Image (spheres, rainbow, N blue to C red):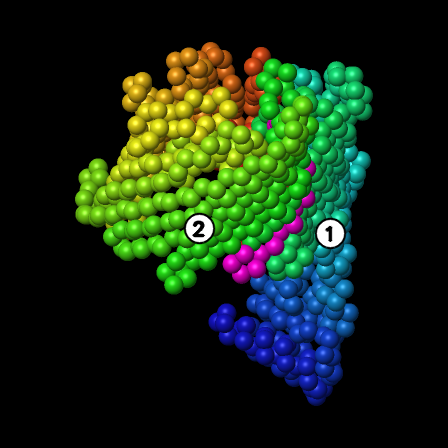
Amino acid sequence: MRSIRWFCLFAVFATVPLAHAQEGPPSGGVSVPGLRLSPGLRTHTYDPDQLPVFMEADSLTVEDQDVVRLEGHAQVRRRDTILKGDRIQYDQVEDELEALGNVRLLREGNLLTGPRLKLNMSSGTGEVSDARFFFGLNGSSGSAQQIRLLGQDRIRAERVRYTGCSCDDPDWELRARRVDFDYNSGQALGYGGVLYFKDVPILAAPIMSFPISRDRKSGFLAPTFGLTSKSGPEFSIPYYFNIAPNRDATLTPKVMLRRGLQLSGEFRYLEPSFSGETRLSYLPNDRVANRDRYLFSSQHRQQLSPNLGFNWNFSKASDDAYFRDLSVLGTGLASTATLERSFTLNWNQGYWNAFGRVVSYQTLQDPLAPIVPPYGREPQLHLTGQRFDWNGLDLRLEADATRFRRHDAVTGERAYAYPSVSYPIIRPGGFFIPKIGIHATRYNTDSFQGAPSSNASRTVPIMSLDTGLIFERDSSLLGQPARQTLEPRLYYLRVPYRNQSNLPIYDTALADFNFAQIFSENLYAGWDRIAEANQLTAALTTRWLDPKTGVERARIMGAQRLYFSDQRVTLPGEAPNSDGRSDFLVSVYGALTSTLSGETTVQYNPKIERVTRSTIGARWSPQRLSTISLAYRYKRESVSVPGQELIDVAFQWPLAPRWFGIGRINYSLLENRIAESVAGIEYNGGCCWAFRLVGQRYAVAKNNATTAVFFQLELTGFGGIGASPMTTLRRSIPGYQVINPPPEKGTVFERYE
């Protein structure tokens, strides 16, 4: 009968007010099953602005011509407003509702409940006593002695208890004398508020602003505090300016007990054709360093047209030790050695790409580990053109002209052009790619320390042949079906010798020897040196692939380079290689299960019969919030040259219900010291809160380390109190996962609807 009753109500109350109805006789009336319409229903005229009202109840009575009473499972709907209660009275003239008993008002995705409610449907104003509320904007809830509805988008609550928890028994709540909620802005303003955690007051303010949605808003962010060995106790309270949907700013005063007051600001903007951010930090009269300290940075990216754009990147620090003394640990900035200042103009059109830029650097020297400053490029013009499959040919041109500048070294200009052509033949079972190019370079070197200026040029042809085959067969891996491949590859490179000892070194260094470099055209990264070559690289790879998904489950690779002539082109101070073969490279990777994987790469020198470089790593993640990663890195080119030998262990692991241990140790075996260590605990308080205590020791240089302690109490739906260690944890622990992910929308109404 429920569906029949609904149809009758819909027909009568959705249709009669929209048409001219004749006044009923003095006696008698209209009745339908489950409800009664009193006689004397007045004629109504259709109002295009008046939306229909839909009603449902066990019984319905129309009295005094304009008053409708609903009893038993009463319900009234209009637009996006739904009102339910045991009894509802509706005044059609005033467009007002009064509900009694188990009242529930659902409006704008938010739910109000209470024993009694008055509501004007037209203005959206009304009041609820002894109310509870649930906001679908962010899953928050609470109670109030009285709630006044100030329109469709605002309410005012008196004697309020508010929480962002979706739990039945929340662990934290805000108690305030009054709170004004604004749905449009997604924020609330509390007066006389005290924040309680486990019934213990932890924060109080006469006026407190907080979000009721996941949208950004202006206001104070949660205060942060921490402890570092170089600055002592630190405290900051950022203020966030939500200027526009595409612009914001943050102003952060930070008190460092040992150093003083630092003021930092950040401004960000995002437009359809440009974006950027600017940051400034200023610490007047650092009490430890006895000087003013500052850091400024600005990045901007802009697209002037579909083919033309520009960007700049400018950073400046007050002194060399700024990042070592004042950087936030865990971000990796403490080891910053150079700050870039550049302006770049980009252009692309069809097959062509070009850029022009001016680049200089501020070098932050560490007295314990000095570095060689990089050259500035003032300016650099670069052009690249390439076209694929032009009558079967791949064509490429790279050209560059740069003026290199550095105050303490040889400066000058370098221009080069490198056209090349290849004819790739690629088939399902293999490939054959011959290639030839000519690299022409011109140098104009300035006079330096009494040496006269000079000019030099170099023209080198570069020829290569890259070929390989791919075989497949059905196989198995650890008892599971797999598709195995066998991929032999040969790469021959021929570059004739050119004497280059008179050429300066601007941006060139010996490239790292690995599987990518072993198939490259040059031993060096950069074009100030082009090594002669008459060499053949041989490689063999076998893979095991999942036959259904194609996912690589295991891989073994081996490669070695054979030299048919001795090396004569070198960098200053580099010993030439007279051996007939390179080191041997071997790499093994395996995903033994969906939770366990490992990879190792070994570089073996057959001349001295020892491993010169190796990396071994493994990771086990049996379930969510459980991961362990192990890594061993070894590098030593010769017995007489100091090398590196590091052990890296990182983990996130459950210790007890809701308790998690986190840590990382990066230990240098050769130096017998810890390069970096992280240790801490996390506690997941359920749906309401999480607690983190993390300590970190970070070595920025030899005999120069910084220690910090992070403490954070994160309240779901309110924010974090303390210094967040999340950047540290994500950077330090591979596979780290947040123990308290944000709740999904709708969880509140799944419980209360």
- Contact, CB < 8 Å: mark 2 with mark 1? no
Q: In this view, does 362 lie to the left or right of 604?
A: right
User: Callout 1 environment at 10 Å: few (<14), some (14 to 19), or many (20+)?
Assistant: few
Residue name at image x 66 percent, y 72 percent: 53
- Closest to the observer, 165 or 495: 495
Badge 1 element: strand
Residue 353 in the image: x percent, y percent?
Answer: 56, 54
338 falls in the magenta region: yes
The answer to whether residue 185 is visible is yes
Which is nearer the N-term, disc 2 or disc 1? 1
Q: Which residue is drawn at 56% across and 14% down?
A: 702
Given residues 563 and 596, the one toward you in this image is 563
Q: Position of residue 247 (x, y in %)?
A: 72, 49
- Give neighbour class at mark 2: few <14, some 14-19, many 20+ (Cα, 10 Å): some
Q: Which amino acid does label 1 sit on?
A: Ala
Mark 2 — residue? 420
The kind of secondary structure the magenta stretch mainly shows is strand
Magenta range is 336-352
Q: What residue type is labelled 2?
A: Ser
Q: Quadrant of the C terminus?
A: bottom right
Q: Does 83 appear above or below 506?
A: below
Coordinates of residue 727 in the picture (x, y in percent): 57, 32
**Eyeballing the image, is 733 above or below 313?**
above
**How far is the residue under mark 2 from the one under mark 1?**
50 Å
* Callout 2 secondary element: strand
Residue found at x 34% / y 34%: 597
**Nearer to us in this view, 421 or 359:** 421
> Residue 10's x, y, as percent?
59, 75
Q: Name the residue under label 1.
A: 244
